[in-house]
Image (tube, rainbow, N blue to C red):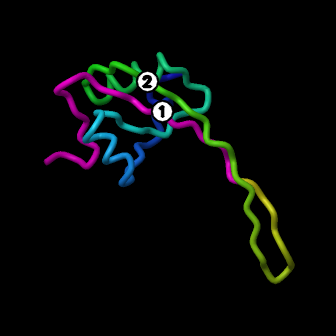
Amino acid sequence: MKLTDVLIKPVLTEKVNKQIEKKRSYTFIVDRKANKLEIKKAVEDFYGVNVTDVNTLVMPGKAKSRFTKSGFINGRKPAKKKAVVTVAEGEEINLYGEI
């Protein structure tokens, strides 16, 4: 798997911002097939930081339904994989752009 395909997007929520301040842990949506070593290498290459720890979790797809003129439509949201990446002491990733 190419490293450009591993990271899909960073997660930017209030909970993640607290994790960044307290534990230096950043959360990314990653490809479902990516393993921890590929995630670590991709973050180190793209952001130029040293990664000390990678934790992964798979968020299961959710069932969704909606009502339309022709009746109910049932479907599923796709499952996704998250990676929580902890960087070395004194390093940080600027997710909000260049300041």
Looking at the image, the residue that sits furthest to the right is: 70
Q: State the residue position of label 1.
A: 83
In this picture, is 9 found above or below 89?
below
Instruction: Tell me which residue sits at (34%, 41%) in the image.
Output: 19
Q: Mostly what secondary structure, the magenta segment? A: loop
The percent position of residue 81, horizontal first and vertical second, equals: 57, 36
Looking at this view, is 42 or 19 the one in front?
Answer: 19
Q: Which residues are magenta?
A: 77-99
Looking at this view, is 89 or 68 the one in front?
Answer: 89
In this picture, is 40 found above or below 61?
above
Toward which corner of the image does residue 74 lie, by quadrant? bottom right
- Label 2: how many residues lie within 10 Å, few (<14), some (14-19) or many (20+)? some
In this picture, is 92 found above or below 44?
below
Horizontally, residue 16 falls left or right of residue 32, namely left
Instruction: Tell me which residue sits at (39%, 29%) in the image.
Output: 85
Q: State the residue position of label 2.
A: 54
